[in-house]
Amino acid sequence: EVQLVESGGGSVQPGRSLRLSCAASGFTFDDYAMHWVRQTPGRGLEWVSGISWNSGTIGYADSVKGRFTISRDNAKNSLYLQMNSLRAEDTALYYCAKDSHDFDYFHYWGQGTLVTVSS
Amino acid sequence: QSALIQPASVSGSPGQSITISCTGTSSDVGNYNRVSWYQKHPDKAPKLVIYEGSERPSGVSNRFSGSKSVNTASLTISGLQAEDEADYYCCSYAGSSTLIFGGGTKLTVL
């Protein structure tokens, strides 16, 4: 059974940093691209970033480019999102999602970790 | 990266059919066969219901179907049931290793 468990969320002040993690199990992690998708009450679902199986291809939404960094450790079956210079508009529930292959679609989702950016 | 355009809300009675549109451009929906649809119930993770425009994952009811014409993709739900009431989001590959969602559509089953 595919399982994706996010962690690392919390409450942080604007301008600070936070690192999210996603622990994957139940599939061959290094065969698939992985993504971060967030949900905000006002803007629905928003794709944040994706990374190919070997980290050779990485993409970011314009809204986070230059501030967020996605990475993965295939030996640890883990996905990460380093979030710097956080803004109030980054407040959201952040989901880790498994791709079907390589930037195709989100086959499985975690339950999410909540990030709140507020002074 | 502008969001794909979806109607804010649609509604239908049990047993009826509804269609949700998802309009993009020739740079995303129109250029790739990588449109997917997700069902989102409150406090639940999104669930894939359609991929590659019209393919249904194993376990998803055949009441869900998808199609695409030029720059617009559509999700049709036939034989509406109360459990179908949810938010629905389309998503497309947009080139350069990016993906883009629609703004979401709230389906109300009357």
Image: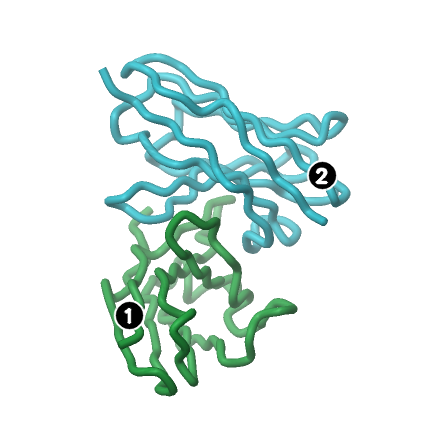
Q: State the image coordinates of residue B19 (x, y, percent, origin top left).
A: 35, 78
- The chain drawn in green is B
- Give the image's coloring scheme: by chain
What kind of element bears circle 1?
A: strand
Vertical position of residue A3 compared to residue A14: above or below? below
Q: Does residue A32 appear left or right of residue B62 in this picture?
A: right
Q: Position of residue B71 (x, y in %)?
A: 36, 69
Secondary structure state at the residue bearing disc 2: strand
Is A10 rendered above or below residue A42? above
Residue that carries the numbered disc 1 in the rendered image: B108
**How far, Cα to Cα, is label 1 from label 2?**
35 Å
Left of B58 or right of it: where is B42? Answer: left
Q: Which residue is rendered at x = 55% and y = 75% of the image? A: B61
Which residue is found at the position 29% from the left and 80% from the top?
Answer: B12
Chain letter of the cyan region: A
Q: Which residue is mark 2?
A: A25
Query: Which residue is rendered at x = 38% and y = 27% of the image?
Result: A115
On the same chain, marks 1 and 2? The answer is: no
Three-letter residue code for mark 2: Ser
**Rendering coords of residue A36 (x, y %):** 49, 38
Above/below status of A83 relative to A55:
above
The amino acid at mark 1 is: Thr
Q: Which mark is residue B54?
A: none
Mark in front: 1 vs 2? 1
Residue positioned 45% across, 41% down in the render = A37
- Looking at the figure, which quarter contains the C terminus of chain B? bottom left
Kindly identify which chain the residue marked by label 1 belongs to: B
Residue in the foreground of this view, choosing between A61 and B12: B12
